[in-house]
Amino acid sequence: QQQVKQSPQSLIVQKGGISIINCAYENTAFDYFPWYQQFPGKGPALLIAIRPDVSEKKEGRFTISFNKSAKQFSLHIMDSQPGDSATYFCAALGGGSNYKLTFGKGTLLTVNP
Amino acid sequence: DAGITQSPRHKVTETGTPVTLRCHQTENHRYMYWYRQDPGHGLRLIHYSYGVKDTDKGEVSDGYSVSRSKTEDFLLTLESATSSQTSVYFCAISDPRTGLETQYFGPGTRLLVL
């Protein structure tokens, strides 16, 4: 049972555009939602995270939007740059565990110059 | 990579051969994790440890065993490697002092089982 569904699988955006990646979850007990960024040949690195008590969190060009009633959250990358080209994973944590992350399948983002 | 090293970084082995991957951390984090990453599957938890000699299974633990005799080292063993275990393996760490929910990942080990 896939508890976190991520879309799209891949995304191509022009430099300066907005990249949007969506995730949906099933377990209403999840209470922490991080996004990880992974460059080729590297391990994933935490990019930004949100808890369900807020609907939006912004860090620089990266924003998480959270819709608790719809059980959905999304990552928005404003003014996308070629250096943002990477694989992005959403994840969720909670539901009785404060350390077991459930990951989405990932989105390969390509930002063309 | 947050004071985490993995060895070896690349390995080619044959079916039926035992393989041990090592994760070493210098952060004194209590929790350590082993994940595998496969195209179309994202990251899946194999085993984790919440202290020395304290380990438990993740969602894809069949065919794998782990050991943790020191805080800094977490070993993943494939007792008899199969082609389905060809993957990229990542170690991660976290700690209650800095927030268990924040996991830091190592650089990965790419394993090919022929």
Image (cartoon, rainbow, N blue to C red):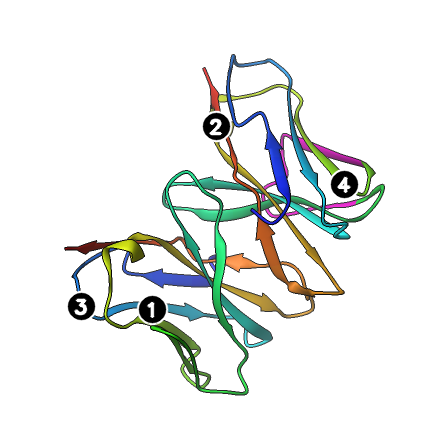
Residue to which mark 4 is pinned: B72
Is B67 positioned to the left or the right of B37 in the image?
right
Label 1 crowd bin: few (<14), some (14–19), many (20+), radius 10 Å: some
Quick check: is B76 in the magenta stretch? Answer: no
Q: Chain of mark 3?
A: A
Marks 2 and 4 in Cβ contact (< 8 Å): no
Dot 4: what SS? Answer: loop
Which comes before the other along the chain, label 3 or label 1? 3
Residue A64 in the image: state x and y as whole percent: 40, 76
- Residue plotted at (49% across, 45% down): A43
Circle 2: residue type:
Ser
Dot 3: what SS? Answer: loop
Task: Report the span colored magenta.
Answer: B55-68
Q: Chain of mark 1?
A: A
Circle 1: residue type:
Asn
Marks 1 and 4 in Cβ contact (< 8 Å): no
- Residue plotted at (56% across, 46% down): B1
The numbered mark at residue A16 is 3
Which comes before the other along the chain, label 2 or label 4? 4
Residue to which mark 1 is pinned: A22
